Amino acid sequence: MKRLTVNELVAMFGGLLLGACLFADWYSVVSPLATLAERTGIGTYSGWEAHSLLRWVLLVMAIAPFILAYIVLRDHQLTWARGELTAVLSIVALGMLLYIGVIDRPGEPAGQIELAWGWYVALLGSILMLAGAALRTGETARRRKPPGTL
């Protein structure tokens, strides 16, 4: 456990937040005529209820920091910088969360669907994942290759 740094712990905490908040309230329907997750009426819905495919994608992305910690603990040799894949996955998760929260909310009409606290905490989790993984990537020195090789 001594091999784990604060960066991995921050990324793991962010992954835990993202994974746990999938089951928290993400959307509040404020109109009795609005439809979300094939249900009509006022209510709150979690990310797990509102998204059929995206929930699995976000859950896999939330696991990425724990895989990074496993790689660091076992001292596996990689062909890329440690934390690089986790940083890329957290950027994708952040982009997807911003898209479904700001640009294209689920439900009809989208103007009657408001964001609840769980979406904001999931967004914070993806930001923490990105920060921890990006800082971990910066710790690893890249090997230089001879000119003309890929």
Image (cartoon, helix red, strand yellow):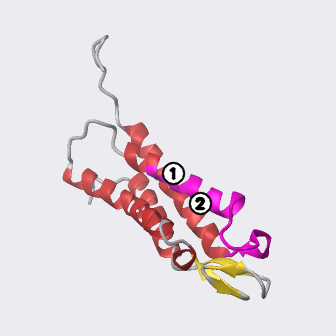
**Residue visible at 59% across and 69% down in the picture:** 121
Predominant SS along the magenta part: helix
* Mark 1, secondary structure of its residue: helix
**Residue visible at 40% across and 45% down in the picture:** 136
Q: Position of residue 141 (x, y in %)?
A: 34, 31
Say whether residue 110 is magenta.
yes
**Residue 36 numbered tag:** none
Figure quadrant of residue 106: bottom right
Disc tally is 2
| Pick the front one: 73 or 32 | 32
**Residue 97 numbered tag:** 2
Q: Tell me the kind of residue under disc 1.
A: Val
* Mark 2, secondary structure of its residue: helix
Q: Which residue is mark 1?
A: 92
Tell me which segment is drawn in magenta: 89-116
Say whether residue 91 is magenta.
yes
**Residue visible at 74% across and 74% down in the picture:** 113
